[in-house]
Each structure stands twice: as C-alpha cells, then as structure tokens.
Image: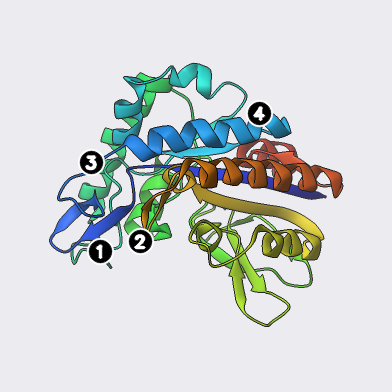
Amino acid sequence: MRAVAFTVDVDRDVNQACQGRSCSVSQGSDAPRFDSSARGLREVLRALEGAEAPGTFFWEGRTALELASRMDLVKAMSGHEVAAHGHEHEDFSGEGTGIPLDRQAVRGVLESMEGALDSTFGSSPRGFRAPYQRTSPQLMEELSSRGYLYDSSATVQMVDGRVAPYRNELGLLEAPVCWSRDRQGRKIVSYLWPYHEGRRPMSDYLELLDEFEEGLLVMATHSWHMVENYCTGPLPRERAEEGVRELTSFLNAVRDSGAEVTTIGGFLRRHHGL
C-alpha cells in the first residue's frame, strides 16, 4: 500500500511561542491575528479542489471560532477530515515558553479546544497534531484517555522508501511526518515550510515522493503560509497564485504516481483497524 495524506494546520497567522505565556502570538504583534489563515485556507481548498483531493485539516480551536464568522466552515470542510491542533496554539512541552503544561492544564486546553471544534463542526472523534509538533507525556496520556483517534506530531525517518503509522507505548496510533535526505545529502522533511520560504523548490518534494515506496506519506503545511512568508510578510498576489498552481500540480503528481490520495483518518480506518 502506498498512500499520501495532505495535511494543513489551520492556526493563527505566523505563530510564535512567547516566554512566560502558554498561548502564542502572531509575529510582529502581541496578540494573534487570523487574516492570512482565512485567506490561505481558501487557497489550499482551491488547490485541493483542483486536484480533486481530500485533505486533513488540523484546526486550532480559537482559529475555528474566528474563521466561522467569516465563512461557512462546515461547507468548506465537506469531503475533508477535521482534526485538532490545540486551542490557543499552546506549547504543551514548554520548550518555547518556559511553561510546560501539567496534566490538569493539558486537560483544560483540550476541553476548550473540543468545545470550540464541536460548536463549529459538530461532535466526533478526531485526530490530533500538537502545535510546533511538541508533545509531552501528559499530553499523550490525555489524548489516549480521551479517545483520540491518532496523533500526528512525530517526525520519523523514511527508511528504504517506507514510512508508516505505528502505535506508541500507550497504544495510540501515530501517523508521523517524515524526513529523508535529498540528492545533495541534505535533510528534507515532508513539511512544506522551506518551500513557502523560498528555500526549496516543489521539485524537491516530488523527489521525496519518488523515493516513497510503501506506507503513508504525511505531507504538511499551514494555511497562512499560502499567502504570507514568515520572514518577509504577505505575498504578492501572483506568488500566492503560483503556490496554488504548484500545490495542485504536486497533488496531481501524487495520483499520477499511482499513490492513493487520502486523509489520515481514512487510511487508518482502512488499514489499521481504527
């Protein structure tokens, strides 16, 4: 089995962890903003529609509430998977904030997030990806005890063309992002951050796709990154349009390669007894 899941973290614009605060802010501000995330979400959906591909969307609770006032999110997510991504883009580990969250604090965050997502999309079991992909034992224990379907916070190496979901020590399914080496020997991760920042062409990710032979390749990006650069700010309209075209072409290349284009949840239900 050879399948690819395209995943999107839908969170506050250009988010940054802050020392002494468990929540994050947007770069250049002392508070979060959501305009780029809203516009970028529309662009990602255009690309997926153009390729007739489903996506897995990891929603931050606060962002879902903010964007629900700007668009019909239930309609936007039709045919896609809704998963979870914290409430205020918390750093559960405390690595970037100096405030690691204990079990009670983790529980409070998940309850707030679940309330936001349930009110926006309806109640259902979900997968989870930690903001910054930073987890903690307390978080993983709480996800397991609350019946989450899977986690997608880990990054593992693709070995001999294979990367696949596995169960962690708590029995929770992990659907990891992966890394490998490009033809120059440089590390490449299946997160599109360097592409959006102009440090890698999309062709590098096509080569990663060519290397992939078996399992589930989880590709990932952020909604805001479709229209805003972390280093230089908002993108010119023509560059954003180019990004939509290149993402659509990548997704078409996935299907042309013979791989199944799927959601994480869909793959796990079919192949891992979810």
At numbered mark 2, what does the secondary structure look like: helix, strand or loop?
Answer: loop
Mark 3 vs mark 4: in front:
4
Residue 94: mark: 1
Q: Residue 122 in the image: x percent, y percent?
A: 43, 19
Q: From what the image shows, is residue 172 above or below residue 112?
A: below
Quadrant of the rendered image containing residue 119:
top left
- Could you tell me if the residues under marks 2 and 1 are in contact, i.e. CB atoms within 8 Å? yes
Q: Is residue 49 left or right of residue 106?
A: right
The answer to which of marks 4 and 2 sits earlier in the sequence is 4
Quadrant containing the C terminus in the rendered view = top right
Few, some or many residues within 10 Å of mark 4 (<14, 14–19, 20+): few
Residue at 53%, 25% (x, y): give it: 77
Q: Is residue 60 visible?
A: no
Mark 4, residue position? 49
- Could you tell me if the residues under marks 4 and 2 are in contact, i.e. CB atoms within 8 Å? no
- Could you tell me if the residues under marks 3 and 4 are in contact, i.e. CB atoms within 8 Å? no
Residue 136: mark: 2
Few, some or many residues within 10 Å of mark 2 (<14, 14–19, 20+): some
